[in-house]
Amino acid sequence: MSNTQRAISELRRLVFSGELPAGSDHLESELAERLGMSRTPIREAARTLESQGLLELRARKGVRILPVSLEDMREIYDVLTELESLAAERAAEQHYTGAELGELASAITDMKAALEVKDLEAWADADDRFHVELVRLGGNSRVASITAMMSDQVRRARAVTLFMRPLPVQSNEDHQGVYEAIAKADPKRAHDLHHAHRQRARDMILDLLERHRLRQL
């Protein structure tokens, strides 16, 4: 892993954990010292994270961690719901073999195992893998690039609400249904099941943020 890749990974971790809270300002030199590296990989990492909407680069002022508002989340989920549902539909049209759907099945297996021991962080990691693989199977590179750009904002909201929500049993059932629709080459069912799944996730997260008065992340 290069220093830039490590900087990206570490800065993302600090943002998602809240150690670099929304609205906070940080000099490149401060972040470089914190991560034990030079300013060059920090600057390169910041450019990448700026394109993903996590922070803003400001001349002579370093970086500002951008907040995500409730309205931002509504808009992001609206886009992700449509694009990921399209990916599910396209994936079902490909007539993939069981082996080709192996990573999707593995993510579901890991989500179920995580829930059995109530390891929500492991569940969230497996959930990420499911959504990334679903989009990949859809075969549209533009859908993949747009969803990747927005998925970090969803992760921030989920990180905040992960331990507020009920155990995501319904989510696991939704993923299983989408997988089975793709395996059976049923595009409409794959689309509709995933669309309903994303809408439920959106409504739950927005409701939690509203109830806990977390209007910005």
Image (cartoon, rainbow, N blue to C red):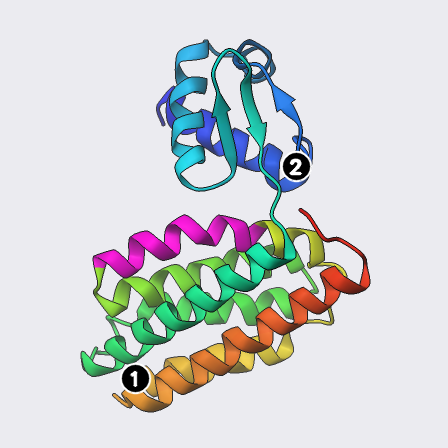
**Marking on residue 39:** none
Query: Nearer the observer, disc 1 or disc 2?
Result: 2
Q: Residue 146 placed where, x, y %?
A: 34, 54
* Span shown in magenta: 141-155
Residues 80 and 16: in front is 80
Label 1: few (<14), some or many (≥20) within 10 Å? many
The amino acid marked with disc number 1 is Ala
- Disc tally is 2
How far separated are the C-alphas under marks 1 and 2? 41 Å
Residues 69 and 46: in front is 69
Residue at 70% of width from left, 64% of height from top?
118
Q: From this viewpoint, which residue is outermost toward the right?
A: 212
Q: Is residue 169 left or right of residue 150?
A: right
Instruction: Compare marks 1 and 2 and give the one earlier in the sequence.
Output: 2
Q: Residue 19 placed where, x, y %?
A: 69, 32
**Marking on residue 22:** 2
Residue at 63% of width from left, 73% of height from top?
203
Q: Is residue 44 left or right of residue 216?
A: left
Label 2: few (<14), some or many (≥20) within 10 Å? some
Residue linked to disc 1? 183
Location of residue 56 with respect to 88 vertically, above or below: above
Q: Is residue 212 left or right of residue 12?
A: right
Q: Residue 152 placed where, x, y %?
A: 49, 48
Task: Answer whether residue 152 is magenta in the image.
Answer: yes
The amino acid marked with disc number 2 is Ala
Q: Quadrant of the N terminus?
A: top left
Task: Answer whether residue 85 is magenta in the image.
Answer: no
